[in-house]
Image (cartoon, rainbow, N blue to C red):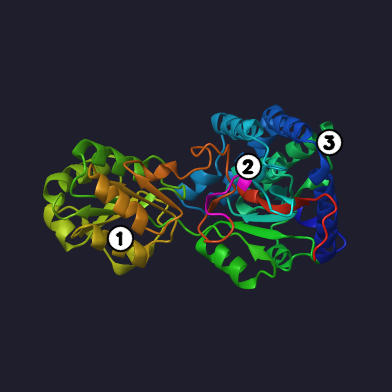
Amino acid sequence: MTVATRLTPSLAEALQAMGTAARGAAVTLRQAPAAQRTRAIRQMAAQIRADAAAILSANRADLDAAATRLTGPELDRLALDRARLDGLAAGVEAVADIADPVGQETARWRRPNGLDFARVRTPIGVIAVIYESRPNVTADAAALTLRSGNAVILRGGSECLRTSLAVHGAIVRALETEGLPPAAVSMVPTADREAVGLLLTGLGGTVDLLIPRGGKSLVARVQAEARVAVLGHLEGLNHVYVHAAADPDMARAIVVNSKMRRVSVCGAAETLLIDAVAAPALLPGIVADLTAAGCELRGDGRARSLAPGIAPVAESDWTTEYLAPILAIRVVDGIDEAVAHIAAYGSGHTDSIVTQDPAAAEAFAARVDSAIVLINASTQFADGGEFGFGAEIGIATDRLHARGPVGAEQLTTFKYVVRGAGQTRP
């Protein structure tokens, strides 16, 4: 049986049945003890390790099929080896270690009439996650939604479908081992694009929230067509601003790490802004470091005058998420121009300033309206694990509900529990 024929008798009917089953599973999860869900998450990690041979074999098949269609960085995002698979399982275990958010009180107060009010975290319900060629999202999303008491429907990209299905198989076995319904983590077993359209309808009211994780076109489609709430994860048009008061060694290290540690992640820097006061002394060294690391550089006129080997920058470079060893460079006249550039071209994802001037650092943090603003640190820290969230489903760039790394806590909403002693309202 092929992947594409597993959904019968029709795609629409099969997905509706999946949504209905997920809704039932969400009711079970809402009532399941935190300890049971914790055991299930740990069992997921153990089962992923136990199924390593099958998962890696599926991944090799995905890589072979995608070799002529994807670029090097895209293939890197898709690829798993034993070390990455162990890291994937360790990320799941980290989710098991974080505090369970379900039932947590975030505020409590008493009114003069004696009523006791509590604001309490509660699961959202059924979440659909639509993502592209990142097989780790399958495990991360399953662990985080289970930690937060939600059921999830996963729709992975066609390039990683075999890998995602193999990981999903391990997750289902873990759920069954711990007595939880397999529908708590469902996966659409087809690459048919119609499946995305059906998920966007909300499957007859069974889906409460959509989370797209992928390229600009995928996120744009979900935001334009969805009939249910969307938690947006936009592209990472990230900047490092080297201020006039930057420490030279720190600046060089942060710029290179922000760009080159791993170019295919959404936290990679795509533009370097460097203060005109600092540029003559600092830019040639930064350029030498980046060039030695294999980075292609494109700069404005002032940057090229200081480092003649840089290629000329085009207007489109300021709005391109390269996800490749390419960096655009602009020389700016102070913090005002740096902030203006980020406001004009950034995606509200992650931006960093390098400076030894505390006032400049705080001004940058206050004025840059991005989900993550760093001071004297690499943009590559835009990662749920680095925030202590255990893992993330994505970096939310919206301004409502959740922003920045979306971990278990961000996958809950809240309700008010009001305790009385017979009060009636006059």
Q: Nearer the viewer, residue 41 or 2?
A: 41
Secondary structure type for disc 3: helix
Q: Which residues are magenta?
A: 402-409
Residue 180 lies, in percent from the top left, at 83, 39
Secondary structure type for disc 2: helix
Point out the tag, 3 or 2, that comes first from the N-terminus. 2
Marks 3 and 1 sit apart, C-alpha to C-alpha, by 51 Å
Determine which residue is flagged by label 3: 176
Point out the tag, 2 or 1, that comes first from the N-terminus. 2
Marks 3 and 2 sit apart, C-alpha to C-alpha, by 18 Å
Residue in the image at 69% along x and 53% along y: 111
* Mark identifier at residue 140: 2
Q: Amino acid at mark 3?
A: Glu
Determine which residue is flagged by label 1: 339
Res 271 visible: no
Marks 2 and 1 sit apart, C-alpha to C-alpha, by 34 Å
Q: Nearer the viewer, residue 111 or 97?
A: 111
Residue 327 lies, in percent from the top left, at 31, 53
Q: Nearer the viewer, mark 3 or mark 1?
A: 1
